[in-house]
Image: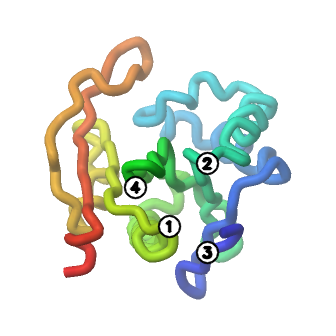
Amino acid sequence: MEHIRVNDKIRLEKINLSMAQVIFDTIDSDRSHLKEWLPFIDQTKQISDTEAFISSVSGSNKDNIYTIWYKEEFAGLMGFKDTDWVNRKTEIGYWLRSKLQGKGIATLCVQKLISFAFKNQKLNRIQIKVAQKNNRSASIPQKLGFQLEGVERAGELHQNRYLDLEVYSLLKSDWLK
């Protein structure tokens, strides 16, 4: 699906190369905030880095990435990553620019993607991984009924150190309740 309407203020639009400039400009202007939890920020030095990312996920059957638009302003990225179609499971990842955090945007978008994954894509399991101590990000799966399964020790290399990741999951049977 190319476009998902979340509500009257928020929409998700499938990522494409024409969006590279706005994505890069957002990363560049919000770099100090975003790099605290996102390991790719330091490697995103020019627009060609963003274009390479978009090209790598476009047409992939494992990744389905959307841009988030709030009141027609670019807000961040969100999507399915590392989808395993054989076992009917995926992971949802997300980031928002700092000035748009705290408005419930990410929570509403994740909620919409959960519904899309279980209803339209016929998936059975969704997981969200969050760096320990990233309480803002962890609040999203917690609010949406995900279960904390455990910690993936040293799960992500970030600024020359490994971060432990909390692994949250939601099953279709949990969601249907």
* Vertical order, 124 against 175 (above or below): above
Tell me where residue 82 appears, x and y as whole percent: 48, 42
- Residue found 45% across the figure and 46% down from its top: 84
Q: In which quarter of the image is residue 157?
A: top left
Amino acid carrying label 4: it is: Arg
Which mark is first along the chain, 4 or 3?
3
Crowding at dot 1, Cα within 10 Å, few <14 / some 14-19 / many 20+, comes out as: few
Q: Report the front residue among 58 and 23.
A: 58
Looking at the rendered structure, the secondary structure element under dot 4 is: loop
- Residue found 76% across the figure and 39% down from its top: 55
Crowding at dot 4, Cα within 10 Å, few <14 / some 14-19 / many 20+, comes out as: some
Which corner quadrant holds the C terminus? bottom left
For label 2, the residue is 61
* Vertical order, 159 against 148 (above or below): above
Tell me where residue 114 appears, x and y as whole percent: 40, 68
For label 1, the residue is 121
Q: Report the front residue among 72 and 40.
A: 40
State the separation of the CA atoms marked 4 and 1: 9 Å
